[in-house]
Image (spheres, rainbow, N blue to C red):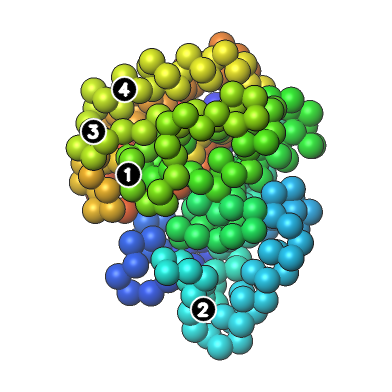
């Protein structure tokens, strides 16, 4: 069995929200720079497919999908940006990018749950963890991690699917999709207060299946690792997932311009190693990792390197 697959597609670089926007095509280039290193060249690359509408509909209602498709069509017709919210726009290349980002998540689940591979990393954009079932926001259109989790449940019979999110921003969209689903677990380490304003401690979901572990501005390696070790990892292990999905955002890095945490490159390798360790003990090492945030390009390349090293380690 292959250790790790990479899912990506050049079309994910065609989603462009305009000059100066932090969620830029250069982010994908920075991630691919990490993946092109000699140590990762042997990893099999697969094209991220277009996500089928019925998979999107596992999370997003038909009215939302129709509205977004209409906006995509308008952006293509006008050959210009169409704003979805204050932070998020779509352009002529955005539809294919968004569909392939969600499709990568679905294909990665198929590969891992189908026994082809233990782990997979999806180097795609736009990210997804802020997209709620009926609302795009925060650079996100489709809720990629939630779609992947529901696909694992409905197609592969995974009764318990966990998402652990170490992006510096709380994944309000994933939480909204999971909070009333006892077979889905969501844990987030994030700076608080910070956009989007959700992620307060004490939110527990319908079956103690939500864990928010907020960190104050200025939190660094010690606080992050303690939060992971004392709260996230024990609760994840108690949940006993059939599949672990990582929302891999690298914007808690000390160099990132969109937040005020002080993580180092190595923290992402440490966290990934610990998460993979839980997966090995609970679900035969089945892990799907999805790119979320990370907006300093150098830090994004280096953090991705540490993340991938831990994903492929024995």
Q: Which quadrant of the structure image shows residue 242?
A: top right
Q: Position of residue 43 (x, y in %)?
A: 50, 36
Query: Gap between marks 4 and 1, in whole Å?
Result: 19 Å
Residue 25 shows in the view: yes
Q: Residue at x 46, y 60 (%)?
A: 139
User: In this rendering, would 126 be left or right of 96?
Assistant: left
What residue sits right under mark 3 in the picture? Answer: 219
Query: Gap between marks 2 and 3, in whole Å?
Result: 36 Å
Of the residues under marks 1 and 2, which one precedes in the sequence? 2
Query: Gap between marks 1 and 2, in whole Å?
Result: 29 Å
The local crowd at label 2, few if under 14, some if 14 to 19, many if 20 or more residues have their Cα within 10 Å, is some
Residue 46 shows in the view: no
The local crowd at label 4, few if under 14, some if 14 to 19, many if 20 or more residues have their Cα within 10 Å, is some
Q: Which quadrant of the structure image shows residue 176?
A: top right
Q: Secondary structure at mark 3?
A: loop
Residue 74's place in the image compared with 119, above or below, is: below
Kindly indicate whether the residue at mark 4 contacts the one at mark 3 (C-beta within 8 angstroms). no
What residue sits right under mark 2 in the picture? Answer: 82
Residue in the foreground of this view, choosing between 272 and 66: 66
Q: Position of residue 84 (x, y in %)?
A: 52, 71
Residue in the foreground of this view, choosing between 308 and 272: 272
Of the residues under marks 3 and 4, which one precedes in the sequence? 3
- Residue 193 circle label: 1
Foreground label between 3 and 4: 3
Q: Residue at x 42, y 69 (%)?
A: 86
Query: Gap between marks 3 and 4, in whole Å?
Result: 10 Å
- Residue 225 circle label: 4
Q: Residue at x 27, y 29 (%)?
A: 266
């Amino acid at each position: 069995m292959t250790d790790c697959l990479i899912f990506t597609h050049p079309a994910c670089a065609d989603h462009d929200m305009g000059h100066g926007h932090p969620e830029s095509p250069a982010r994908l280039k920075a991630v691919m720079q990490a993946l092109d290193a000699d140590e990762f060249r042997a990893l099999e690359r697969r094209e991220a497919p277009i996500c089928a509408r019925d998979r999107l509909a596992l999370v997003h209602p038909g009215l939302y999908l129709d509205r977004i498709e209409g906006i995509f069509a308008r952006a293509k017709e006008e050959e210009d940006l169409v704003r979805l919210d204050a932070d998020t726009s779509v352009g002529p290349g955005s539809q294919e990018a968004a569909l392939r980002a969600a499709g990568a998540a679905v294909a990665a689940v198929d590969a891992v749950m189908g026994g082809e591979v233990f782990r997979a990393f999806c180097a795609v954009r736009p990210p997804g963890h802020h997209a709620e079932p009926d609302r795009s926001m925060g650079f996100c259109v489709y809720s990629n991690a939630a779609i992947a989790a529901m696909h694992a449940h409905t197609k592969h019979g995974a009764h318990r699917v966990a998402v652990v999110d170490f992006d510096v921003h709380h994944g309000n969209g994933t939480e909204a999709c999971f909070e009333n689903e006892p077979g889905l677990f969501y844990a987030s380490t994030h700076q608080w207060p910070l956009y989007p304003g959700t992620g307060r401690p004490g939110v527990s979901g319908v079956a103690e299946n939500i864990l928010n572990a907020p960190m104050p501005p200025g939190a660094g390696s010690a606080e992050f690792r303690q939060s992971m070790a004392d709260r996230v990892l024990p609760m994840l292990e108690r949940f006993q997932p059939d599949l672990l999905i990582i929302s891999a955002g690298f914007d808690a890095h000390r160099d990132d311009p969109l937040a005020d945490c002080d993580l180092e490159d190595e923290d992402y390798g440490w966290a990934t190693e610990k998460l993979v360790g839980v997966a090995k003990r609970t679900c035969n090492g089945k892990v799907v990792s999805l790119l979320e945030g990370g907006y300093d390009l150098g830090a994004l390349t280096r953090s991705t390197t540490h993340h991938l090293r831990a994903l492929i380690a024995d």
